[in-house]
Image (cartoon, rainbow, N blue to C red):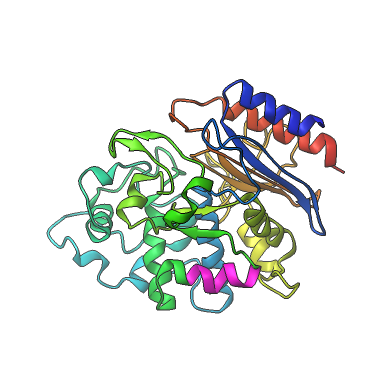
Amino acid sequence: MDNLKAYLCNSVEKGVFPGGQYVIGNTNEILEEDCFGTLDGSHPVQKDSLYDLASLTKVVTSIAVMRLLQQGLLCMEDTLSEFLPDIDSFYPTYQGVDKGTITLLQIMTHTSKLHGPIQLFRSCDTEEKLIKAILATPSRDVHAAPVEYSCCGFILLKKVIEVITGMSLDKAFNSLIFEPLGMENVMFNPPASLLDNIAPTEFCRWRNKIVRGEVHDENALVMGGISGNAGLFASAREVAKLARMLLTGKDGKGGDFLSPFIIKEMTKDHTKGLNMARGLGLQIKRGPGTHMGDLFSDGSFGHTGFTGTCMFVDPYRELFTVLLANRVHPSRENEKIFRSRRIFHNLVIVKYGK
């Protein structure tokens, strides 16, 4: 057993996570792919096991927006009111809640006036109520924190994508992304027949059960499990197809998928000089202290998911990594993955970096 898998297996023994999958690749090939540990303490992880991707769903949403940009159906300076013209009429008596002027660029760089984590699921039981609650929430002070990570904007992007495409978000993702990239083992709301091969997440006090095969994110659950911020389930080898596309711009058959100009715009640091480094729906490495560890190049990019998932791309080394785990099983209080993930990515560069 080499140092990469040995390290991950050792992390299982130390209680970092029950198990997981990883894929390392470059523009031409998969360099290494394996799984380790168990899904739930007893059932071994398989290469086709499904993990709740959590906020890696935001990467897919962002790629969908980029595809629509490429087709000339939107631009980054478009406001929400361009696609949702009645946005400010939801709460006509509420003062100072002008969300219609928020741009797609602000949403995707997390620089909008939308707040960060909000437990809207506690007061909203339908998608319509949840979206109206987002629009009715007073704006945050963007001067205090220019960049504030927010799921709310990506929930609203679901509506934008659906209005533009005339399709539900799941069908839009299939048409815009999954089918062209040959992604088959990826889905919202997995069927019960797959339950035994899905990694469980935590014991949810709100639902009073261990969550398995149902989206972990509570706001996304209110959205019917299909949202722009969370909800997708997939295996690491499917996420790897997204990562490779961000390196090459090509689809699953070698055809053009995203223009290199669009990928360059998507993966650059749009928030230089601000408190967080963000691309368009992506985290950007700017110095130390990131989930990418110490050795990934500055300017590398990717995203994490709360459940324990991550995907990162080092374009200068033409290298990508995908690591899926369920670190929140059985509790989100387990934060050991943050150090473990950095060491894993250091080991990847030591072994495969150039």
Magenta segment range?
172-181
Residue 159 lies, with reference to residue 200, above or below; the image says below
- Residue 93 lies, in percent from the top left, at 12, 59
Q: Which of 128 and 88 is in front in this view?
A: 128
Q: Does the magenta stretch include residue 178?
A: yes
Residue at 34%, 42% in the rendered image: 141
Q: Is residue 10 in sight in this rendering? A: yes
Q: Which residue lies furthest to the left in this view?
A: 93
Q: Nearer the viewer, residue 212 or 173?
A: 212
Which quadrant, please, contains the N terminus?
Answer: top right
Image check: 324 left or right of 76? right
Image check: 143 left or right of 42? left
Residue at 61%, 59% in the rendered image: 266
Q: Residue furthest right?
A: 354
Which quadrant, please, contains the C terminus?
Answer: top right
Residue at 84%, 41% in the rendered image: 352
